[in-house]
Amino acid sequence: MHPRTKVSRRITLYSTKYMRHSLSEGFIFLFLFSFFPSPFLETGFAQPSILSNNNVVINEVQANEPGSYTKLEWVELYNDDSISHDLGGWVFVCKEDTTPIPPNTIIPAKGFLILARQLLSNPPDSISFEGWWGDRSGVWGDSPEENYPALQAEMGLTNSGGAIALIDPDKNVQTFTWDQDCGDGISLERVSPDQDNWLCCASSGKSTPGKKNSISTTYSENLDLSMEPNPFSPDGDGFEDEVTFRYTLPMMSDLTLKIYDIEGRLIKTIFDGESQVSGEVTWDGRDNDNRYVRIGIYVVWVEVKGNSHKVKKMTLVVAKK
Ligand SMILES: [Ca+2]
Ligand SMILES: [Ca+2]
Ligand SMILES: [Ca+2]
C-alpha cells in the first residue's frame, strides 16, 4: 500500500504583531533591526491580533529562495476583504530597505499581490520572479499563470530569520518575524488571515505565490473522515475493489487509523500514530496478513493525538459486488 498522503512537517509557530500606533519610519527601522525584543513589545506596542483596517495581511514569505538565487525572494500579501483595495501609499519595509507602493496598485478582493525582489529580468531568464513562477516572457501578466498583480520591492530575506513590516497610510504597522528556515525553496505560509500561526509550506511545489496557501486548505479544528465507496467489494474484479479514506486533521496531530471486525479483533492497521496532515489513503480490503477480509461489517477506528485528542468510529461494509 502506498498511502497518498502529504508529509507533515514539524511545526514552529511564528508571531505576527499588529500595532496601531503612529511611529516614525526611522523608529520602525530601529525596531526591525532589533528584531522586536520581547520586553519592548510587552510594555507598550503589542496588540492583540487585529488586522489593519483594510484586511490586507502579509500572507506568505519566500525567505529561502530556490537554489542560490537570492533574487527569487518574495512576499505575498492577501486581501481578506470583499472589496479590492488600492495599496498606493503603503510602505513595505525590510531591514534598511523601504519600498513605497505606487498609486493604483490594486489588490483584488479575496486576492493576492506579490512583492518580488526581482520581478523581471532582461533578457528573460529564470532568475526573476516572472521567469521562475511565470512564463519567462520578460513581461508580468501576459500568461494565465500570471493572473495576480506583482511588483518589485527592495528586500533581503535571511533564510534563518528576519523581520518585515507593512505600513498603511494611517501608519498602522503589521510585522512578520521568523526564526526558522523551512528548507530550500520552501516558503512560510500563514494558516489563515485572522490568525498568527505560520507553517512551512506543505505543497509539493514548495510555495504558493498568488494562490491560496497550502496549509490553509488542510487546516482544521476538527477531525473529519469520509469513506468511499461504502460498501466496497474487494474481490479483484476491478469494481469498487478499494475504499478511499479522506481525512482532515487538527493541526500538529498524529493519526491512528485501524480497522476492527465487529468482535473487536484488529484486522488492519493503516496508520499507527503517524504524523500526518490532511490527505487520503486507500485500503484494498486485505488484512494485516495480506488476506482478503470476509464479507461483513467492520469498524473503522480513527484517533488523533496532539494539540487535541479526538476519536471517531465509523462503520464500513465489505460486500459482494
Ligand atoms: Ca534568502
Ligand atoms: Ca510573462
Ligand atoms: Ca500563497
Image (spheres, rainbow, N blue to C red):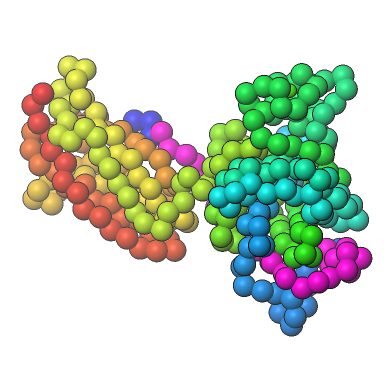
Query: Is residue 249 depicted above or below 204 in this figure?
Result: below
Indicate the quadrant where residue 147 lies.
top right
Residue 125, position as x, y percentages in the image: 81, 21
Which of 60/259 is in front? 60
Q: Furthest residue to the bottom?
A: 43
Q: Which residue is depicted at the point 68% across and 49% down?
A: 85
Q: Which residue is depicted at the point 10% across and 42% down?
A: 297
Q: Which residue is depicted at the point 59% across and 38% down?
A: 211
Q: Which residue is depicted at the point 86% across and 49% down?
A: 99
Q: Which residues are magenta?
A: 4-32
Left or right, 42 with reference to 199: right
Image quadrant occupied by the C terminus: top left
Which of 11/140 is in front? 140
Which of 224/21 is in front? 21
Residue 217, position as x, y percentages in the image: 48, 45
Indicate the quadrant where residue 226 lies.
top left
Q: Is residue 14 magenta?
A: yes
Image quadrant occupied by the N terminus: top left
The reply to whether residue 179 is in sight is no
Left or right, 7 with reference to 50: left
Indicate the quadrant where residue 204 lies.
top right
Q: Furthest residue to the top?
A: 237
Query: Is residue 318 depicted above or below 77 in this figure?
Result: above
> Which quadrant does ligand 2 occupy?
top right
Left or right, 51 with reference to 257: right
